[in-house]
Image (tube, helix red, strand yellow):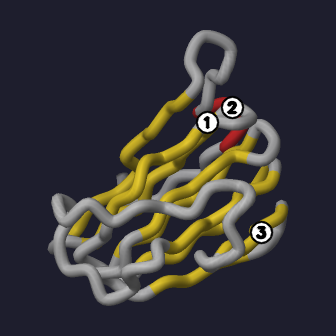
């Protein structure tokens, strides 16, 4: 695949699943993925070992960070903030917006609406 035009809406089929992840490219530890989430679906707290950019093509996401921002493991018991807790950081990312975060930061992602986004890990 040297040159190729892709229609995002044709790649994702959200009718039968709450979450779909399609690997588009991978090269030397860098990844390009297409992700779809149904409304209210959550990607549980996790860390990426690379810097990450999220580009929302449809819908709206909420990216939430834990209280333990300096956490360096996934097994430490960090708790993500609940909807009534203002102690954690939350960011809305809407259609057409990009959100960037550094590696090794505990975070989770929630779909506020049915959403599709590009996940770029470099």
Disc 2 or 3, which lies upstream in sequence? Answer: 2
- Cα–Cα span, label 2 and label 3: 16 Å
Please provide percent x and percent y for residue 45.
40, 57
Q: Which residue is mark 2?
A: 38
CA–CA distance between discs 3 and 1? 15 Å
Q: Position of residue 87 (x, y in %)?
A: 62, 78
**What residue lies at 56% left-to-right and 56% top-to-bottom?**
109
Using the image, tell me which numbered label, if any, was put on residue 19: none
From the image, tell me which residue sits under label 3.
Answer: 92
**Within-10-Å neighbours for mark 1: few <14, some 14–19, many 20+:** some
Residue appearing at x 77%, y 37% in the figure: 114
* Secondary element type, mark 3: strand
Q: Residues within 10 Å of mark 3 (few under 14, many from 20)?
A: some
- Element at badge 2? loop
Evaluate if marks 3 and 1 touch, with contact meaning CB atoms under 8 Å apart: no
Relative depth, front residue between 23 and 67: 67
- Disc 1 is placed on an element classified as loop
Quarter the C terminus occupies: bottom left
- Left or right position of 58 against 91: right
What is the x, y in percent for residue 35? 54, 45
Residues at marks 2 and 1, CA–CA distance in whole angstroms: 6 Å
Q: Nearer the viewer, mark 2 or mark 1?
A: 1
Q: Is residue 54 left or right of residue 92?
A: left
Q: Which mark is residue 41?
A: 1
Contact (Cβ within 8 Å) of mark 2 with mark 1: yes
Instruction: Farthest residue to the top: give it.
Output: 16
């Amino acid at each position: 695949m040297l040159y190729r035009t892709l229609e995002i809406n044709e790649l994702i089929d959200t009718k039968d699943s709450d979450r779909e992840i399609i690997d588009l490219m991978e090269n030397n530890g860098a990844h390009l993925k297409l992700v779809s989430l149904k409304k209210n679906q959550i990607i549980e707290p996790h860390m990426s070992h690379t810097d990450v950019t999220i580009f929302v093509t449809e819908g709206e996401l909420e990216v939430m960070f834990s209280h333990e921002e300096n956490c360096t493991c996934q097994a430490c018991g960090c708790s993500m903030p609940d909807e009534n807790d203002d102690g954690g950081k939350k960011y809305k990312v809407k259609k057409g917006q990009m959100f960037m975060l550094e590696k090794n930061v505990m975070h989770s992602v929630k779909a506020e609406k049915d959403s599709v986004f590009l996940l770029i890990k470099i």
